[in-house]
Amino acid sequence: MTEVNQKNAFEHGEGDAWYQRSLTVDLERTYRDRLLDYVRPGDSVLEVGSSDGRNLSWLLAHGVGRCCGIDPSAQAVAEGGLRHPSLDLRVGTADRLPVAEGETFDLVWLGFFLYLVDRALLTKVVSETDRVTRDGGTVVIVDFDSPQLRRRPYRHCDGLMSFKMDYSTLFTAFPHYVVVEKVPIRDAAVGLAEKAQDRIALWILKKDLTGAYALEHDDD
């Protein structure tokens, strides 16, 4: 019998169900223009959790170069390929990105899904993200901004949990990742969420493999 966990659930139906529920939601409109401050014309962008590619299509129209999207929903990828044929959309999950060794991107966008990643796979997600982010590149995280570690039952699938935390700390544990901007995300109708644990934020991190280390000389 297939093990009940987040990865299996999203690969076997919940990914498509999530896509269907999100068709009328466009949360990304409230912050995606911030990304334009961190990409140059022609830069490459990878969005993990890309749904049907609507965000990447918007970025492409604003001068971004190669755009690749990865999502567990085969339905989203298929429909996105029809709507946005200029995009490179692939079926996959964040712990094992369908990206060849040596293929890197100027900006990697983790779009509001980390709270649903199996805790046993979280370090793999960080490793995979780092693998596909070029040195000097940017990582974007959109997720819950809970001041405390919290978990709760996932309301759409029995037996699963969701997890809230500051996910930027998984990257800043390494000295070569630095948060350069954090933006609270406000709902256009109600502003910030009433409960602190329900608030969402955008983190922009820069990757610099050597810049964090002061050069030491023999006479130091």
Image (cartoon, rainbow, N blue to C red):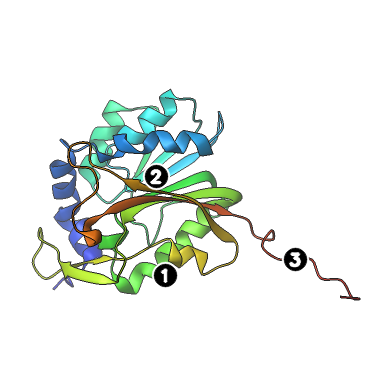
Residue at the spot x=10%, y=58% of the render?
156
Would you say the residues marked 3 and 1 are in contact, meaning their CB atoms lie under 8 Å apart?
no
Q: Give the alpha-carbon distance from disc 3 to disc 1, as whole Å.
A: 27 Å
Residue to which mark 3 is pinned: 214
Q: Amino acid at mark 2?
A: Glu
Image location of residue 169, percent across then percent down? 44, 66
Q: Which residue is mark 2?
A: 47
**Res. 56 image quadrant:** top left
Nearer to the camera, 157 or 93: 157
**Does 158 sit above or below residue 51?**
below
Q: Tag 2 or tag 1, which sits nearer the N-term?
A: 2
User: Please, what secondary structure does the residue beneath circle 2 have?
Assistant: strand
Residue 206 relative to residue 87: left or right: right
- Density class for disc 2 (Cα within 10 Å; few <14, some 14-19, many ≥20) is many
164 left or right of 59? left
Q: Which residue sits at x=18%, y=73%? A: 3
Sequence-first tag of 3 and 2? 2
**Residue 136, placed above or below residue 147:** above
Identify residue type, mark 1: Thr
